[in-house]
Image (cartoon, grey):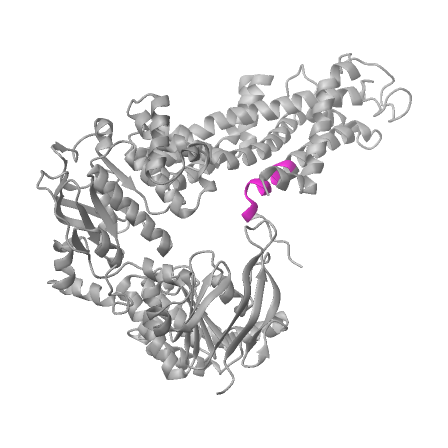
């Protein structure tokens, strides 16, 4: 067998002394051959991104290489000078980043950005550069290359920008392509297209691909071999099919078991009761433009109707921009709807003033997406939870006592009440957010992407907690998510949204078995690793 | 590393803090060091520094320059702090209202703020002091009126970004009242930029007061550094010390405040700090 493209041998990266562990990466060894895709999988903080940055020679100043070697086609990268490393980047190693929205220069035309790749390495003459740029745009599947070279990044969608990034990464035909969570910020249908594109380019050009991801679904789609990282150490490595089918390390087993299955569990029997939340004909239109600019109208929510019974979970799924979050926020009047009725049990809230609404706010509460932004950093956890009851007129001492009970209910120690949010992990913070939502004994909970920012193992725990709380308290839940796996596991019924409208609403099992709308079918087909994770949990 | 130890690791900030402590000590000890009025003529006119009993010499009328500087320190510090507090009292509520409510209220407040920003601030201060008669309160008021607009802009920007945070939305959903949300959820989180800005504003206020006094618009009953520089400027060739030492005092005080302000800024926003590269 020939020399591997990338050979990482016993690589260790040390962290500054204030960090919670000494090594970002410890004694990591792996290699990638030409035309092969290696996935580095791990949860946040496992050191997977540091691995990619070490290969690129782009480590943050605080992280130092403590030992080992990185060989690119038998050439030691760690011994290169800054100048030599600059030659390697782009020419021998291409890189795609996570965030397509910020990785392109907003003030440069797409064509100029691609041509810059050649200029930086002194490759080709100007007319050949232009020709090659057009070819590259064509190759990554962007329509109308002659137009694309002249547009600016903001005129392209996220998926299109990621294609441009791939075109740039591949401009000089590098031997190695590093992709650091390139599809995490994209919608599921776009993600499927980008994964296909990366895979096609790999087989066409024989490029070695180092693919960093946290998503086992993506791994199942694209990887030839995988390396599983836990706290900076490789705990398992091997062929994808083997590792996914028969993981040997307990951590890998835990991670794979935590991936929610796309097969929904059996339907639950629900008591027939009057709806806790009824929404009829909800509409919201955003208008842009000022005095002089011609106004543009976007129908974010268009004639949306649904009802949720006590103890039931209704999933609201769709891609970004489909209006699913706007619906959730309209139900809470965080966004003012233009039209329609919102009924909480028997009270219609859409026309109330904010002041009149305040006493009714306890009936409907929200669990937010970002566990890091949803808790005020300057207030203790106990006070954060007690704020709601205090605002509704409960005595402060009683509210604090209740806050401690709630912390116990969501699986934290009551002593946590005296600590501040920054002392907790993401999953723990999400538990605090749930405790806050429960403090007012709501009848309806809106969960807006409540588990999307969490690692898969934590995600499973939070989903269990939500299910458990629903069983005990009988709340109705509107579960807004982009993740069909999660929706399959937690929702009784699912409403699929596209461009502000509900295109299909059906019981979960039925929706997955017989999707009637084309868009639903497209969404289901795009779920990564569909076949590999079809097992019922 | 917490903010305090980051501040302590900053040499410039420590020097600034030391200078400020010296200044505060001078203000506190002024009645002991120079119990007599600084206006009293105590010696021969235009005595050179260290000539006779006077450490920093005497001015054109035989008044002790050192006594003037010690008593002037009290006025400078007082005006710097009081006018900054006054400017914050105008700027913070306006910025918070504009940022939180947005829309028409934001437009109205920001146009009003821009109205003040378009007028050259020193010219406006001169006009205000001239109309109101030069006195300590009118000078404080004039400085506050010309220095609140940047505070409003800063707070508005902070509040605009904070109000979209999920914890503020959570406070809305649990039914907290609007004033309560502004005071408990939003303003405490703008504290760091306010402290940094205030420390730099004190320096600007001291400079502004000195400039006013230099032009003869200071409180006529108070010995200030600006007045001393102004009074000595016609004899700068043959008696340099009369203008030089009060000028040095202004320079050191403003420098100290800027060093401390920068230090606090770096300590509170460690990520914005310029990276030290080899």
Q: Measured along the vertical axis of the image, is residue B233 above or below residue A19? A: above
Q: Measured along the vertical axis of the image, is residue A284 above or below residue A496? A: above
Q: Position of residue A118 (x, y in %)?
A: 49, 77
Find residue A312 and report its image quarter: top left
All told, the count of numbered labels is: 0
- Whether residue B18 is visible here, answered yes or no, is yes
Q: Residue at x 45, y 30 (%)?
A: B92
Q: Position of residue B2 (x, y in %)?
A: 58, 40
Q: Residue furthest bottom?
A: A1
Query: Is residue A406 left or right of B239 when viewed as pictured?
Result: left
- Whether residue B106 is visible here, answered yes or no, is no
Q: Measured along the vertical axis of the image, is residue A101 above or below residue B256? A: below
Q: Position of residue A324 (x, y in %)?
A: 22, 50
Residue nearest the viewer, comparing A231 with A217: A231
Find residue A184 and report its image quarter: bottom left
Q: Quadrant of the C terminus of chain A?
A: bottom left
Q: Residue at x 43, y 46 (%)?
A: A425
Q: Residue at x 43, y 76 (%)?
A: A170
For the stretch drawn in magenta, what is the main secondary structure? helix
Stretch in magenta: B260-271
Query: Is residue B278 left or right of A415 when viewed as pictured?
Result: right
Q: Residue furthest right?
A: B52
Residue nearest the viewer, comparing A180 with A47: A47
Query: Is residue A512 left or right of A446 when viewed as pictured?
Result: left
Q: Position of residue B48 (x, y in %)?
A: 87, 26
Query: Is residue A106 left or right of B139 when viewed as pictured?
Result: left
Residue nearest the viewer, comparing B146 with A324: A324
Residue nearest the viewer, comparing A106 with A45: A45
Residue A525 within the magenta-colored segment of the rendering: no
């Amino acid at each position: 067998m020939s020399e591997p493209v990338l050979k990482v041998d016993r690589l260790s990266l040390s962290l500054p002394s204030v960090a919670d562990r000494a090594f970002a990466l410890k004694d990591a060894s792996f290699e990638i051959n030409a035309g092969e895709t290696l996935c580095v999988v791990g949860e946040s903080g496992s050191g997977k991104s540091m691995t990619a940055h070490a290969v690129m020679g782009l480590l943050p100043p605080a992280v130092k290489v403590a030992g080992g070697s990185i060989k690119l086609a038998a050439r030691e990268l760690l011994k290169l000078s800054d100048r030599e490393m600059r030659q390697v980047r782009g020419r021998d190693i291409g890189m795609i980043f996570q965030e397509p929205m910020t990785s392109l220069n907003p003030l440069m035309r797409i064509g100029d950005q691609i041509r810059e790749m050649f200029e930086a390495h002194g490759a080709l003459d100007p007319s050949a550069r232009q020709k090659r740029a057009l070819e590259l745009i064509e190759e990554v599947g962007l329509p109308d290359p002659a137009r694309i070279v002249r547009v600016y990044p903001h005129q392209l969608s996220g998926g299109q920008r990621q294609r441009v990034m791939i075109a740039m990464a591949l401009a000089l035909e590098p031997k190695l392509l590093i992709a650091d969570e390139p599809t995490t910020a994209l919608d599921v249908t776009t993600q499927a297209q980008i994964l296909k594109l990366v895979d096609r380019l790999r087989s066409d050009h024989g490029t070695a691909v180092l693919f960093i991801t946290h998503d086992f679904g993506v791994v199942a789609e694209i990887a030839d071999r995988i390396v599983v990282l836990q706290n900076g150490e490789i705990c398992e490595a091997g062929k994808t099919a083997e590792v996914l089918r028969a993981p040997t390390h307990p951590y890998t087993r835990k991670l794979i078991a935590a991936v929610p299955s796309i097969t929904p569990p059996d339907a639950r029997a629900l008591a027939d009761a009057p709806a806790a939340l009824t929404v009829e004909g909800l509409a919201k239109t955003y208008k842009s433009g000022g005095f002089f600019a011609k106004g543009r109208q976007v129908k974010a929510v268009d004639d949306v109707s649904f009802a949720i019974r006590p103890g039931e979970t209704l999933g609201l799924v769709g891609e970004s921009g489909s209006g699913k979050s706007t619906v959730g926020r309209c139900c809470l009047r965080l966004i003012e709807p233009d039209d329609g009725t919102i009924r909480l049990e028997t009270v219609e809230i859409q026309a109330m003033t904010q002041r009149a609404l305040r006493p009714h706010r306890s009936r409907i509460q929200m669990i937010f997406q970002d566990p890091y932004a949803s808790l005020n950093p300057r207030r203790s956890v106990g006070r954060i939870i007690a704020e709601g009851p205090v605002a509704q007129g409960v005595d402060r001492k009683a509210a604090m006592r209740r806050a401690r009970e709630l912390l116990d209910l969501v699986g934290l120690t009551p002593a946590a009440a005296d600590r501040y949010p920054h002392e907790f992990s993401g999953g723990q913070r999400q538990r605090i957010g749930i405790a806050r939502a429960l403090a007012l004994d709501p009848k309806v909970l809106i969960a807006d992407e409540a588990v999307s920012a969490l690692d898969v193992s934590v995600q499973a725990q939070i989903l269990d907690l939500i299910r458990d709380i629903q069983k005990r308290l009988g709340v109705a839940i509107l579960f807004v998510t982009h993740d069909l796996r999660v929706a399959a596991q937690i929702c009784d019924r699912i409403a699929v949204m596209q461009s502000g409208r509900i295109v299909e609403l059906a019981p979960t099992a039925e929706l997955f078995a017989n999707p009637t709308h084309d868009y639903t079918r497209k969404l289901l087909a795009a779920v990564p690793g569909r076949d590999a994770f079809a097992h019922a949990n | 590393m917490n903010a305090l130890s980051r501040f302590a690791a900053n040499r410039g900030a420590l020097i600034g803090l030391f200078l400020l402590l010296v200044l505060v000590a001078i203000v506190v000890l002024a009645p002991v060091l120079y119990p007599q009025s600084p206006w009293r003529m105590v010696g021969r006119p235009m005595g050179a520094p260290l000539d006779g009993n006077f450490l920093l010499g005497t001015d054109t009328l035989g008044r002790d320059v050192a006594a003037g500087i010690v008593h002037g320190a009290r006025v400078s510090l007082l005006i710097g702090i009081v006018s900054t507090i006054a400017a914050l009292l105008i700027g913070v509520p306006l910025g918070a209202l504009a940022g939180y409510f947005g829309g028409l209220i934001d437009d109205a407040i920001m146009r009003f703020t821009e109205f003040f920003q378009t007028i050259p601030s020193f010219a406006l201060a001169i006009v205000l002091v001239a109309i109101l008669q030069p006195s300590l309160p009118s000078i404080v008021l004039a400085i506050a009126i010309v220095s609140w607009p940047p505070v409003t802009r800063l707070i508005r920007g902070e509040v605009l970004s904070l109000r979209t945070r999920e914890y503020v939305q959570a406070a809305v959903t649990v039914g907290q009242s609007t004033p309560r949300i502004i005071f408990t959820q939003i303003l405490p989180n703008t504290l760091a930029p306010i402290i940094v800005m205030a420390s730099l504003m004190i320096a600007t206020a001291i400079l502004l007061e000195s400039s006013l006094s230099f032009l003869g618009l200071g409180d006529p009953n108070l010995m200030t550094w600006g007045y001393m520089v102004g009074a000595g400027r016609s004899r700068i060739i043959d008696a340099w010390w009369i203008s030089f030492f009060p000028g040095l005092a202004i320079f050191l005080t403003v420098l100290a405040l800027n060093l401390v302000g920068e230090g606090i800024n770096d300590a509170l926003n460690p990520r914005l700090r310029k990276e030290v590269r080899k």
